[in-house]
């Protein structure tokens, strides 16, 4: 799958026509020496890929086997919250509803929205999902 990118960073796997090979091997940038810097770089990459897409674009589900972009933006934050942050017995979730909404297939962690139904979710909004991502990122780095 090829996606047009605005960046010209060779580390992103850009090919000569200005597109990126999404299957290209991604090596960590040696300038990113700390785990926090690497975490921030990885997290910002998904936001970069979504840049320019509307809320409607991110909410569309093209087929039953593919979740919408908005769901993926949230799920990749839910994973850090559910698997890392929540290991602290004192941890309070950002929004307890998200534990079900963005669980993919971890049955031991509770209920989830079936993949073929994720495109029917009108809430949370894209703005709320992005705020959730920012809060999870803040908590991960703290």
Image (spheres, rainbow, N blue to C red):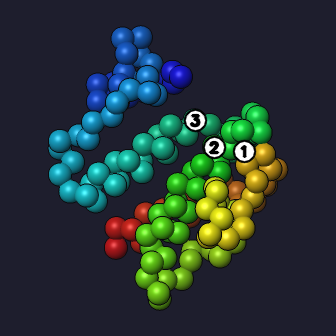
Q: Mark 3 falls on what kind of element?
A: loop
Which of the marked residues, 3 or 2, is nearer the chain's N terminus?
3
Disc 3 to disc 1, C-alpha distance: 14 Å
Taking the image as shown, residue 113 lies to the left or right of residue 94, namely right
Percent x, y for residue 66?
69, 39
Percent x, y for residue 39?
34, 55
Checking the image for residue 59, the label placed there is 1
Which of the marked residues, 3 or 1, is nearer the chain's N terminus?
3
* Image depth: mark 3 or mark 1 in front: 1
Disc 3 to disc 2, C-alpha distance: 12 Å
Instruction: Name the residue: 29% across, 25% down.
Output: 10
Checking the image for residue 69, the label placed there is 2
Percent x, y for residue 129?
61, 58
| Quadrant in which the C terminus appears | bottom left
Q: Callout 3: few (<14), some (14-19), or many (20+) C-alpha neighbours within 10 Å? A: few
Q: Which residue is mark 3?
A: 52
Label 3 close to label 2 by CB (< 8 Å)? no
Instruction: Name the residue: 44% across, 27% down.
Output: 23
């Amino acid at each position: 799958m090829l996606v047009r990118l605005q960046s010209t960073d060779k580390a992103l796997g850009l090919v000569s026509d200005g597109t990126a090979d999404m299957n290209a091997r991604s090596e960590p940038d040696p300038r990113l020496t700390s785990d926090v810097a690497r975490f921030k770089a990885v997290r910002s990459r998904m936001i970069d890929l979504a840049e320019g897409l509307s809320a409607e674009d991110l909410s569309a589900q093209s087929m039953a086997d593919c979740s919408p972009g908005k769901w993926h933006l949230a799920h990749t934050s839910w994973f850090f919250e559910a698997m890392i942050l929540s290991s602290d017995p004192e941890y309070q979730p950002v929004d307890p509803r998200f534990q079900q909404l963005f669980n993919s297939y971890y049955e031991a962690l509770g209920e989830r929205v079936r993949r073929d139904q994720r495109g029917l979710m009108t809430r949370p909004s894209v703005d709320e999902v992005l705020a959730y991502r920012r809060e999870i990122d803040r908590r991960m780095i703290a």
